[in-house]
Image (cartoon, rainbow, N blue to C red):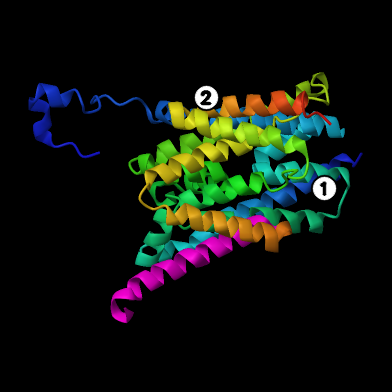
Amino acid sequence: MPDTPYLVAAVLVSAAVTWALRALPFAVLGRLRASRTMGYLQSRMPAGIMVILVVYCLRDLPVTRTAVLAPLAALAVTVGVHLWRRNAPLSILAGTAVDIALASTVFAH
Amino acid sequence: MCISPAVGRDASLSMAVPPARTPSEARAALRDSASVGLGFVPLGVAFGVLVAHSGVDWWWASLSSALVYGGSFEFLLIGLVTAAVPLASVAVSAFLVNVRHVFYALSFPLDRVRSRLGKAYGTFALCDEAYALTAGEQARAWSGRRILWLQLFLHLYWAGGATAGALLGSLVPDRVQGLDFALTALFTVLALEAVRDRRRDLPTPALALLSALAARLLFPGGLLIAAFALFTAGLLVRHLTAKDRPRHA
């Protein structure tokens, strides 16, 4: 196992890079925010970015194996429960519970 | 919400407006954060359990979740540190996975946060979910304080979940799979809500889906940044052509 100084250094390096990426663009982009093009992007980006993050989470689906049915069923349950009740915590818990139940039993590897 | 002073005189209408005594900003933020918290806590626990199962000490999960605070990258970081890769490679990986945050500066309402310290923390804790919650329709009227409280709660959920998972990790059998679906479920719910906010604008999620699928096929190693770049470029093209259409058509 790696030693403690390395483990701490890896966290500090990652934290510095991540914070820089989150903070520095405000200095540059702040002046552009008032423009019409930025307004157009601002209003449309949230919906698109969330869709992209869902695809990112599902990027490694084992599409050639039956195990793919666990996350797909869980996804269907998440969407279905959310359209039905519009209660975010309930949708998240229901979907995750289905995935844990199926992936740990029927489709366990 | 727009409340005219005259509304108070009409009893039936005054029932519809929010009470004058609003709950504190912190309590409102706690309520706002609940949905994401239900995704974050199990996900943080999953991260902590993975740390414990990889043989790294429990405190590392707390340190990473408190200081890096970038969920998807931290899952990746476990593999990097157990392989003891050089710190330069850690920095490059952090850059590639988290460079998407550059896009969040376009619309995150940091201008509502007044103090320097608040602004510093607001950028430090600017995760995907904080962006998603504050970018939504319902967040237009949130104050800077409410946004910061929300970010602090999300940060605590993640770090608390990770610490609990790392401490209890040895109790969870290796065969329990699927905890990490909480992240997918969370983004799915946020996507449904964001699309619902702009239900007349289906081309936007369709463009995002195409961008993500194209990025998955063409740049599997850099899906996120490629998809964000394609999506942004697509939106800009749509914006410019829509503006030009009356002249050229």
Q: Residues within 10 Å of mark 2 (few under 14, many from 20)?
A: some
Quadrant of the snapshot with the N terminus of chain A: top right
> Over which residues does the magenta segment extend?
B222-249
* Residue corresponding to mark 2: A90
Of all chains, the one bearing label 2 is A
Q: Name which residue type carries label 1.
A: Leu
- Residue at image position (66%, 37%) is B66
User: Residue A69 versus residue B227: which sits nearer the camera?
Assistant: A69
User: Residue B22 versus residue A107: which sits nearer the camera?
Assistant: A107
- Residue at image position (66%, 41%) is B71
Of the two numbered discs 2 and 1 in the rendering, the one whose residue sits closer to the viewer = 2
Q: Secondary structure at mark 1?
A: helix
Residues behind callouts 2 and 1 on a single chain: no
In this rendering, the answer to whether B237 lies above or below A46 is: below
Query: Residue reaching furthest bottom?
Result: B248
* Residue corresponding to mark 1: B80
Give the quadrant of residue B17: top left
Give the quadrant of residue B25: top left
Give the quadrant of residue B74: top right
Q: Name which residue type carries label 2.
A: Leu
User: Residue B228 versus residue B112: which sits nearer the camera?
Assistant: B228
